[in-house]
Image (cartoon, rainbow, N blue to C red):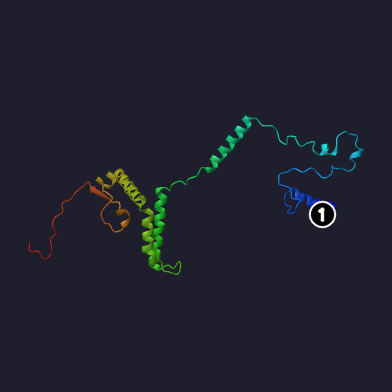
Amino acid sequence: MSWDNVTSDTIANCFRKCGFSTGPDVVPTGVNQEPDEDLVIEGWESLKTEASAQDFVTADDNVATCGLRSIEDLVDEVNEVESDSDGEDVDVCDQLPTTAENLHALDILRRTVYVGFQVQLDLTGIFMHGKIPTLKISLIQIFRAHLWQKIHESIVMDLCQVFDQELDALEIETVQKETIHPRKSYKMNSSCADVLLFATYKWNVSRPSLLADSK
């Protein structure tokens, strides 16, 4: 093999030329050294040419390795790279869930809590009914940013629209929407009405008579 023919002096000269030598013959890095002997290529003498072996080896040192590019090509490439990077940086935002999806999620949460409270469903070694206050606080923290209130108002508005469309069928004279307090949507202990329905027909109610009455 060719490595077997490499002498220790050649290896030492290579390290010395790269600046790794620590002996007295250290050569500063960056100083070009001329080779100790002329480059010899076996059989070069048989070629009928005036060029030397060194000229043959360095003949393509100044040959361009890629095509020449104009300023317009460079500008087009930079613009293309910037447009690609801008497209990658755009964040794709998820679409907001619809009212129906929000209501469905709330229904699932309500049923989960109810089942855990009734049958003491054991999820993590602790009965679910013991976690209801924590779940309630968590739900309030999630929906307190007016989301729960918006869902509540949306349901009430939908009911009012349905009643307005069926006034004659339901014999309703007026549909009155009450004011919804912001905390009413998640306090879960308010009993005031959201919608008041006034009937078209009214009947006079007399005072009932009891068996113990003398008249």
Residue 187 % position (x, y) = 31, 57
Say which element carries label 1: helix
Q: Looking at the picture, tell me which residue is in the foreground, 35 or 158.
A: 35
Specify few, some or many for label 1: CA neighbours under 10 Å numbering under 14, 14-19, or 20 or more.
few
What's the amino acid at mark 1?
Answer: Ser
Name the outermost residue toward the front: 24
Left/right of residue 145 with respect to residue 214 in the rendered view: right
Horizontal side, residue 5 vs residue 62: left or right: right
- For image coordinates 39% across by 56% down, the residue present is 107
Q: Position of residue 73 (x, y in %)?
A: 63, 31
Q: Which residue is mark 1?
A: 8
Task: Indicate the position of residue 99 as horizontal and vertical percent values.
Answer: 39, 48
Looking at the picture, does residue 66 appear above or below residue 205?
A: above
- 33 vs 131, nearest the viewer: 33
Q: Residue at left 82%, top 54%?
A: 8
Report the front residue among 125 and 22: 22
